[in-house]
């Protein structure tokens, strides 16, 4: 928002100035300015620029860059390490250590940025988050030392952790509830475009080039800072002293945060088993990580739109999520007992998995509606951050469980039974809040 104040009649000369504010702040400042300068005639021009759509574009592009940057680590499991001078025997441990450090960064970032977003504002933390993972990704493409690379991926993890949660909360708060569905769909599609781009370029572009491009993309997004504004709902809530006393411990005392975390885990278990571990297991099909991610991304992009429309029509996120979880159970049984024998069958399953794991955005929207403004960003970032970090946990657990089974797919199915059961139980405990007004406090 820009406010331009011209010369005042019958008063000392006042020069024009501008500063970015939200609508609430503009109104208050103009009112105070008018009272302070109560002369016979006050000539000023008040210009309000509605930048909701630019804020949405910023959040969407930020998530696109987020997904692009985080998946670089998964698609380039060998190239970077070879250039760092590691041999074939060191690659597995080097990659594992790298992912451990990055996911520690994600978990810490969830707590740091999530808390600050509820205390200091969504917009500021969104751009600090983008800056953090952008500088880390850019420098990752320039270093020539493995340990420096690991430190930078930790920094990237810090930034990646909370960006989506904060961005979703921001756009849901600034858009009217009738248009909230379109905002969520747009951000979700942007994320899967990011995954799609990585899957294409990973096979044809030098790894350092993609890391540098990912970092530069984040810096370009930061230019939009000058056309975005803070959530009015947050600004009004921040004036409430009692809301400021709420902390992460207040959130952890609520049972519904654990139900929501359990509900998001199936989407990331599927991601781990079908893409990251599955490609290795079905290596005789000669499917690359890029191909697997591409079909997964296409399914996800279509799924986000369809599921959002279905949820809107039936006015229920819970029913939509439950339907998707049961659909994933069915696909997991097919995956385990009717093993894909050809490339097309494997890629079709990946497409269908992507189609139904798209429920995670409906779940994040449900999370946003469950919590008050003073805990909303933290709750959303925790649910998404723990879900994202669980991909790596599941990738480690599957080979361990496989020790007790004769078949990798049966190991996955065993883990599926546990995770899906907990998810169904968790979502059943959540109260439906579809289209709820977000101007409330916990």
Image (cartoon, rainbow, N blue to C red):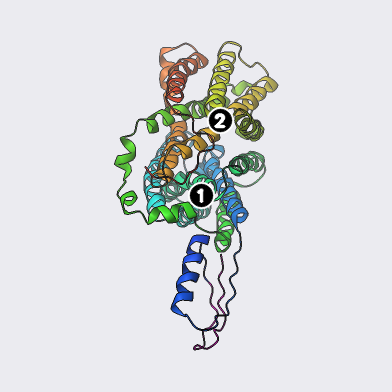
Image quarter in which the C terminus is found: top left
Q: Position of residue 214 (x, y in %)?
A: 57, 51
Q: Earlier in the sequence, mark 2 or mark 1?
A: 1
Q: Splitting the image into 4 quarters, where does residue 425 fall?
A: top left
In percent of the image, x 57 and y 21: which residue is there? 323
Please identify the residue farthest to the front as the structure is shown: 40
Vertical side of 363 occupied by 155: above or below: below
Say few, some or many: other residues with alpha carbon within 10 Å of mark 1 (under 14 / 14 to 19 / 20 or more).
many
The answer to whether one can see residue 281 in this image is no
| Residue 256 colored in magenta in the image | no
Residue 9 belongs to magenta span: yes
Closest to the observer, 317 or 325: 317
User: Where is residue 78 drawn, in percent x and y?
Assistant: 53, 38
> Mark on residue 55?
none
Give, as a single range, the part of the protein colored magenta: 1-18
| Residue identified by numbered label 1 | 170
> Distance from label 2 to label 1 (Cα)?
20 Å
Residue that appears at 56% across and 68% down = 2
Judged by depth in the image, the label closer to the viewer, 2 or 1, is 1
Q: Is residue 63 visible?
A: yes
Front in this rendered view, residue 296 or 11: 11
To which quarter of the image does residue 285 belong?
top right
Q: Is residue 18 above or below residue 246?
A: below
The N terminus: image quadrant? bottom right
Identify residue for label 2.
Answer: 359
């Amino acid at each position: 928002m820009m406010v331009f104040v011209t010369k005042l009649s019958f008063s000392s000369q006042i020069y024009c100035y501008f500063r970015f504010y939200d609508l609430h702040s503009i109104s208050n400042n103009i009112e105070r300015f008018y009272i302070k300068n109560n002369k016979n005639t006050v000539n000023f021009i008040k210009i309000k620029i509605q930048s909701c759509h630019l804020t949405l574009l910023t959040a969407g592009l930020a998530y696109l860059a987020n997904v692009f940057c985080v998946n670089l680590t998964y698609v380039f499991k060998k190239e970077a390490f070879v250039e760092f001078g590691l041999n074939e025997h060191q690659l597995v441990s080097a990659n594992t250590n790298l992912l451990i450090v990055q996911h520690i960064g994600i978990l810490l970032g969830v707590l740091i940025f999530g808390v600050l977003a509820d205390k200091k504002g969504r917009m500021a933390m969104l751009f600090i988050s983008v800056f953090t993972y952008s500088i880390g990704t850019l420098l990752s493409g320039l270093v020539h030392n493995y340990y420096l690379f690991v430190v930078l991926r930790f920094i990237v993890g810090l930034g990646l952790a909370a960006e989506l949660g904060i961005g979703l909360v921001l756009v849901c708060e600034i858009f009217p509830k009738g248009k909230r569905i379109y905002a969520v769909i747009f951000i979700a599609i942007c994320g899967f475009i990011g995954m799609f781009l990585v899957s294409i370029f990973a096979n044809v572009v030098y790894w350092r080039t993609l890391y540098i491009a990912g970092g530069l993309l984040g810096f370009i997004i930061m230019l939009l800072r000058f056309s975005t504004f803070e959530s009015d709902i947050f600004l009004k809530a921040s004036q409430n002293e009692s809301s400021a006393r709420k902390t992460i411990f207040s959130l952890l005392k609520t049972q519904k945060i654990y139900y929501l975390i359990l509900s998001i885990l199936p989407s990331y278990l599927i991601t781990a088993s079908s893409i990251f571990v599955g490609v290795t297991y079905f290596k005789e099909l000669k499917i690359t990580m890029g191909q697997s991610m591409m079909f997964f991304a296409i399914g996800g992009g279509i799924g986000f739109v369809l599921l959002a429309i279905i949820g809107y029509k039936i006015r229920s996120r819970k029913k939509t999520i439950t339907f998707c979880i049961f659909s994933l159970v069915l696909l997991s049984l097919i995956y385990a007992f009717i093993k894909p024998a050809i490339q097309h069958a494997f890629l079709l399953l990946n497409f269908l998995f992507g189609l139904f794991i798209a429920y995670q955005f409906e779940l994040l929207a449900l999370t946003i509606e469950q919590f008050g403004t003073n805990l909303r960003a933290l709750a959303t970032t925790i649910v998404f951050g723990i879900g994202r970090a669980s991909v790596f946990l599941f990738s480690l657990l599957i080979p361990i469980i496989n020790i007790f089974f004769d078949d990798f797919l049966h190991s996955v199915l065993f883990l599926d039974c546990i995770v899906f059961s907990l998810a169904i139980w968790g979502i059943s405990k959540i109260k439906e809040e579809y289209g709820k007004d977000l101007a409330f406090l916990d």
